[in-house]
Image: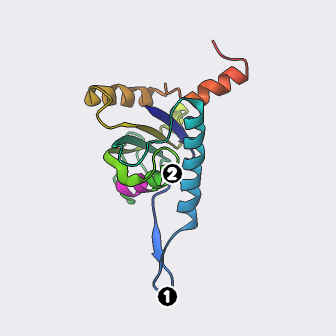
Amino acid sequence: MIEFIVPGQPKPKVTKKDRQGRIYTTPATKEYQCRVAVYATQAMSAGPWPIMERGVPVACEMVFFLHRPKNCPPDRIFPTVKPDDDNYGKACADGMSGVVYADDRQIVHRVVDKRYANEARGQHPRTVIRVWVAGNRGNDSERKRQAIGALDRGHIETPVHERERKQNGRYK
């Protein structure tokens, strides 16, 4: 399983039409997809994971922690406003294409979670992504409950963070 964090405010997939009627992806979406690709590349190089070739079914889990607006009550956990969660998932899936897997058509199972970051507890806007070969994860529902609990407590360690701690001499 490949797991990594993309820091910063998540961006949804947004497309627009130009004057000639051609559809294009907005610059903000492209920048976010590049950021996802950079962190996915770091996670892939930190472990012995080859790119998942065409024909390999892929499952992924994406948790988007969004900045909480000032007018939002502090006890609200889940944002029920636009943009839709599937637009966030599309941007991430496109960013990982060619890095983690050959094409995002390989995704056969995708869990997308959209919630507010608890900035009062030191959580910042970010995206937590896990990708694995579909059918090779064991009890998916139990692992998801454990993972969401760890996310809420802020106890996520990725191979990138572990490597940075080793390089800085703070590895125990």
Return the mark for residue 20. Answer: 1
Which region shows up in magenta? 86-90
Residue 117, x across and y down, in percent: 47, 40
Determine whether the residue tagged by mark 1 lies in a helix, strand or loop: loop
Q: Which mark is residue 98?
A: 2
- Crowding around mark 2 (Cα neighbors within 10 Å: few <14, some 14 to 19, many 20+) is some
Residue 33 percent across, percent down from the top left: 54, 55
Residue 68 % position (x, y): 47, 47
Height in image: 82 above or below 171?
A: below
Residue placed most toward the observer, 24 or 8: 24
Q: How many marks?
A: 2
Is 157 a magenta residue?
Answer: no
In the rendered view, would you say 26 is above or below 41? Answer: below
The answer for how far apart the CA atoms under marks 1 and 2 are is 30 Å
Question: What residue sits 51% from the left and 87% below the top?
Answer: 19
In the shown orientation, is residue 152 left or right of residue 34? left
Can see residue 81?
A: no
Residue shown at the point (58%, 54%) measured from the top left: 34
The amino acid type found where label 2 is placed reads: Gly
Q: Residue furthest bottom?
A: 20
> Is residue 152 placed above or below 7 in the rendered structure?
above
Q: Nearer the viewer, residue 146 or 1?
A: 1
Is 72 in front, or is 38?
38
Q: Nearer the viewer, mark 1 or mark 2?
A: 2
Which element is circle 2 on? loop
